[in-house]
Image: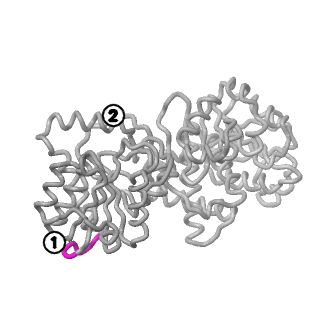
Amino acid sequence: MRTAFGVETVRAAERELMARLPEGALMQRAAAGLAAACAELLGKVYGSRVVLLVGSGDNGGDALYAGARLARRGAGVAVVLLAPERTHAGGLRALRAAGGRVSAAPERDIAGARLVLDGIVGIGGRGGLRPEAARLAGLAAASGAFVVAVDLPSGVEADTGEVRGPAVRADATVTFGAYKPGLLVDPAQERTGAVRLIDIGLDLPATADLEALQYADVAALLPVPGAGSDKYRRGVVGIAAGSARYPGAAVLAVAGALRGGAGAVRYVGPAADAVIDRYPETLVHAGPPSKAGRVQAWVVGPGLGDDAERVRDVLAADVPVLVDADGLRLADRATVRARTAPTLLTPHAGEAAALLGVDRAEVEAARLASVRRLAEAYGATVLLKGSTTLVAAPGGRPVRVNPTGTSWLATAGSGDVLSGLAGSLLAAGLSPVDAASAAAFLHGLAARLAARGAPVGAQDVAEGVRGAWREVVAG
């Protein structure tokens, strides 16, 4: 599992380690890792032109010491100082001693660089870049050079992933000791490029601020039927979705559910003919949901229209319930909070904004804060769909971020498939956090496998879940 830690946690671990090491040793570890990463990106170091954009503080020191190492290997290294009076003195001495120089013509040097190292602002930075720093970042982006961020791109916020103004857009980021949340969450994550973690020996807490499941983590969660299993022991998921106007939503939710590990899918609603025509193995019932038979979990909402009664009936059930799409609009917050069985909400940014009473842009700009707020407000687990899908539970637990997916997944009906898939995992016995996390991982991987660089539809994603499941289990 990949984990990320907030700034104060990382700094506390750094202070504890520095107290046991000779002065400057920790910065040298970071600089050595940074220089090695840059050398690998350059391929041939000797004769390469490298420009360092250096602000004040330790972030700039890391860049300067790394630049010194590259200069000793024959690179032509120039440094642009944004705060000359507050430049890391030891790092600047080391750079000059290695043959590096302070740039007298930043525009010319940046235009001719093969690699630009962003050491403008460290992990404690807040807000966007100041005008001169923004200008230099723009020159770096336009130069065609490979832009490498030191610890994180300057101008993005490490703890939240927010981008409140101009910021560096890196081709790669070399981060030290631990991933920071902003490296994994949009909109900041979109600016990081490939991220490399350099181990500098930090002793970090067991509980992280952010978690990203990997293949082995998801494989350990997926249900596997035993020799004595039958369709009921494997779990039955109920789908209360679709309407006369949107029968396809019911079909897609059932498609996802059939591939999610539950033993049977029970559909309740007016789209029964469409569902049976496509998936004859589905158990159908005219309703209401409470009369449809035993289930271990419910999915309610996709394509439901204004059928508030079906939502109320499902929320009254004493089993886990996933609420999506129209169900989010029709569910009463007090009713959700009063439930004793688990609830999983799966909004996209627009739906989350409506639930929180804010503009969509606010949710998009502060995805991590928004998913946490929503989980606390509803007393429920929340899967916030989007460019980086997040899963949060109330009570301050680590937020999960999904590492799979493709931009082709932004297609009508894909969320219905995800709802059915997650609901099936709930019925199979997974907790809401694990069901949401595993479903998002499989859903994103299925889309990636189905797309392979070309457009996909929601049914393609549903069909791809089996292949994604196999790939995850195979490791």
Q: Amino acid at mark 2?
A: Pro
Tell me, yes or no, whether the highlighted magenta stretch contains residue 168.
Answer: no
Q: Please name whichever residue, 409 or 175, is drawn nearer the observer in this view of the structure.
A: 175
* Residue 277 versus residue 210 in the image, above or below: below
Is disc 2 placed on a helix, strand or loop?
loop
What is the quadrant of residue 125 in the picture? top left
Q: Residue at x 69, y 36 (%)?
A: 357
Image depth: mark 2 or mark 1 in front: 1
The residue labelled by disc 2 is 205
The x, y position of residue 150, in whole percent, is: 32, 54
Q: Earlier in the sequence, mark 2 or mark 1?
A: 1
Please tell me how crowded label 1 is: few (under 14), some (14-19), or many (20+) other residues with Cα within 10 Å: some
The magenta stretch is 42-47
Q: Amino acid at mark 1?
A: Gly
The x, y position of residue 83, in whole percent, is: 29, 50
Numbered tag placed on residue 74 in the rendering: 1
